[in-house]
Image (cartoon, rainbow, N blue to C red):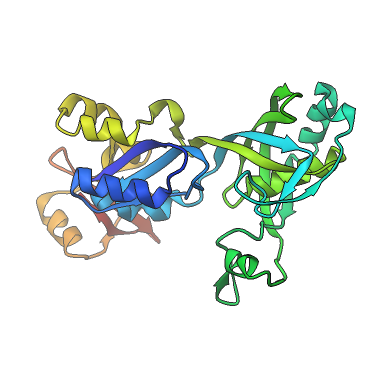
Amino acid sequence: MDGIVIINKPKNCTSHDIVQKAKRILNEKVGHTGTLDPMATGVLPLLVGKGTLCSKYLINHDKVYDVKLTLGRKTDTADCEGTIIEEKDIPKEAFQKEKLERVLESFLGKQEQIPPMYSAIKVKGKKLYEYARKGEIVEVQARPIEIYQMEWQQTEEKQKQIQFRVACSKGTYIRSLCENIAEKLGTVGYMSGLNRIQVGDFKIEDAITIEELEQNIENKDFMAQHFITLEKLFQESQCISLDQKKLTLFLNGVRLTQKLEDGNYRIYCDGIFIGIGTVQNQLLKRDIIK
């Protein structure tokens, strides 16, 4: 079984937990793209078997989140799992739709973002959260990100919460974004809910729970419907058909002349899908073999 299955990760478990469960269920090598925090839910693509070799093609995917931001309190982790370190009054206009939409719109475009201290980014060989847990101060460099879309969804004034949807580039920290939004609203805040609804072309409506995977592992129709094969994953790539002689050379690692543009190609022989090859400087080489 080689390919991808999209899991809807529940709250209060790690991405690693889901990977370990999937390994047991599928009895295959399993990896994932795009770690979700334990408190976060939503789309977690699992790479299965030789699908793990596809990670290099998936790491730069854009993402879409539904976010809850609680105003008036700041935590040390910038989310609901941290300790409250500051409280501040909330201006009444902070909950006005027009004000919220203007503030959200101000974050659109390319920008520099400082990651939160409670993150896995490494500085001088140590993860930022390791410094944070010891109360050590370390300089954190801003990183380039891009916000493509910000959409206000709902206001719950009694709970001091606003909900919005954000489409953003890889590497965007929603916790930092929440703190920055709260600051522009004249107060402080933290991320109190996060649901990832899309990673690249993988959408929440196509996801299944890890329990559904376990319950239907012997259901061929269910698995065919929810499992993305290597051939399907690269369905937008062009095809190259090889005869038996060239296929043998290709499988043995020989580079074959192909007067085609650089890129990834689906490889076939006698109408049978073989795997993925890459063309560079008009030379085709083996990449992922089914």
Q: Is residue 278 visible?
A: yes
Query: Residue 203's spot in the image, x, y percent?
Result: 45, 31
Query: Residue 267's spot in the image, x, y percent?
Result: 24, 46
Q: In the image, is residue 120 above or below residue 44?
A: below
Which residue is found at the position 84% from the left and 41% from the top?
187
Horizontal side of 45 relative to 65 (left or right) equals: left
Name the quadrant containing residue 225.
top left
Which residue is found at the position 66% from the left and 41% from the top?
191
Q: Residue furthest left?
A: 244
Q: In the image, is residue 112 above or below residue 63?
A: below
Query: 233 or 155, which is in the foreground?
Result: 155
Name the quadrant containing residue 1.
top left
Query: Residue 114's spot in the image, x, y percent?
Result: 71, 57
Horizontal side of 16 relative to 239 (left or right) equals: right
Q: In the image, is residue 249 above or below residue 226?
A: below
Query: Residue 60's spot in the image, x, y percent?
Result: 51, 50
Query: 170 or 173, which is in the foreground?
Result: 173
Name the quadrant containing residue 273.
top left
- Numbered disc total: 0
Horizontal side of 222 relative to 84 (left or right) equals: left
Q: Is residue 262 visible?
A: no
Which residue is found at the position 68% from the left and 72% from the top?
136
Query: 182 or 229, which is in the foreground?
Result: 182
Query: 55 or 141, which is in the foreground?
Result: 141
